[in-house]
Image: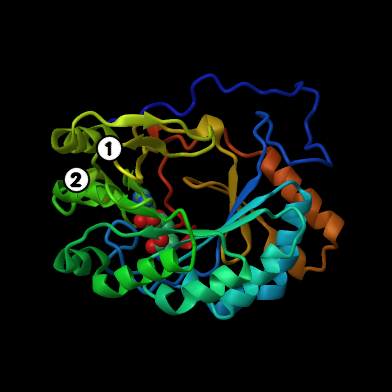
Amino acid sequence: MVAASATVSPIRLFPVGQATAPGSGTALDAFGRAMTYLRISLTDRCNFRCLYCMPAIGMKFQPKDEHLSDDELLRLIGLFAKSGVTKIRLTGGEPTIRPRLVELVRGIKSFPGITEVSMTTNALLLSRLAEGLAEAGLGRVNVSIDTLDPDRFKLMTRGGRLDLVWQGIEAADAAGLRPIKLNTVVVRDQNDEEVADMAALTLDRAWQVRFLEIMPLEGVGDVHDESLVTSEETQARLETRFGPLVPVETDAADPARTWKIPGAVGTIGFISPVSEPFCASCNRVRLTADGKLRLCLLRPDEADLRDLMRDGADDDTLERAIRAAIWRKPWGHGLAEGERETVRGMSQIGG
Ligand code: SAM
């Protein structure tokens, strides 16, 4: 097991006597981290079944009426914006299968304070959506693609078509949804020997190819246990092909450590939640499709905003609930201490 501790020196930045969340300004947690980034899962459904994301059998999907409606979602986003959120990322499940996605993006972008709306997608439907999304205000996309081999792609997604995904990526690039970032989860004996070919995409394209370590979410703990490839191992493979990578400076809140192949146009990112947790600089919370504010990707601590709203809470009450939940955000994901998420899978949270 390679997990490093995510719990090094947690420091409460506020006096012990201050037991409640401040009521204005950007929402902070008790460790002083400002939550400016909200990831929203628009649905728990997906048109792929990636083997590190969903189990082969036994997936259960929520009834649609458990999901936030567009109006409910927009109301909450307005309150998150009042609480200091400036960046929104749409995810899923697969966000592009949500009806009225373009109108939703337009609505989100209309809130003063929301400066950036982006999306994580498998790109299958992007060739017909990219232009409309860009026009509605979507800034950029991260596309999940694990291999450039059509047969392996079919295997890893349990049925997906690489040619359609590739068309989607090109459509996103043409629509200006840039910089395009490609997310590749590295899975031993599946695509680990292909990482240098993926990285080679950055030689003549201004893309970022990012390699992710598998996390043990509900339903895929065994895939993590058997097939985790650390970023260190992936980087060594890249350096065998390309020579030493060159570090690139990035924003401290960026979970990716960024590098470049010497002379390349684009960059390489390593996202290493298992071997090098980045909890200390976490600035994000998540809203699930069923309206739960999830405080840490890998911990089941959630606040139920949907039921509060459906029970008739006014905006002040909801905003206070958002701030209070953020205040109790856990310090770190706890993988090194043996914590395991056994309630929700990644497709129900959104990554
Ligand atoms: N369907 C969209 C997509 O494919 O990008 C959005 C949702 S997907 C859950 C978001 C991201 O989580 C993808 O990049 C996916 O590769 C990643 N992911 C899913 N399961 C994972 C796991 N167990 N460990 C690490 N990343 C995972």
Q: Residue at x 68, y 29 (%)?
A: 32
Residue at disc 1, secondary structure: loop
236 and 291: which one is in front? 236
Which label was assigned to residue 261?
1
- Is residue 284 left or right of 21 when viewed as pictured? left
Q: Position of residue 118 (x, y in %)?
A: 54, 58
Of residues 174 and 117, which is closer to you in this image?
A: 174
For the N terminus, the image quarter is: top left
Res 57 quadrant in image: bottom left
Q: Residue at x 27, y 31 (%)?
A: 245
Considering only vertical position in the picture, is 77 above or below 196? below
- In terms of image quarters, where does ligand 1 lie? bottom left
The answer to which of 116 and 334 lies nearer the viewer is: 116
Where in the figure is residue 100, as x and y percent of width and height?
59, 80
Residue 298: percent from the left, percent from the top?
A: 47, 45
Disc 2 target residue? 196
Figure label count? 2
User: Which of the 4 image quadrants contains residue 127?
Assistant: bottom left
Residue 280 visible, this angle: yes
Q: In this image, 207 relative to 175: left or right?
A: left
* Residue 130 picture location, percent across and down: 48, 72
Q: How far apart are marks 2 and 1 (CA)?
A: 10 Å
Amino acid type assigned to the residue bearing label 1 in the image? Ile
Give the left or right position of residue 85, taking residue 222 as reference: right
Any part of residue 1 in sight: no
The one of 176 and 287 positioned closer to us in this rendering = 176
Q: Is residue 153 above or below residue 264?
A: below
Badge 1 local density, few (<14 within 10 Å), some, or many (20+)?
Answer: many
Callout 2 amino acid: Ala
Determine whether, in the image, residue 134 is placed left or right of residue 58.
right
Q: Which residue is drawn at 30% across and 75% down?
A: 164
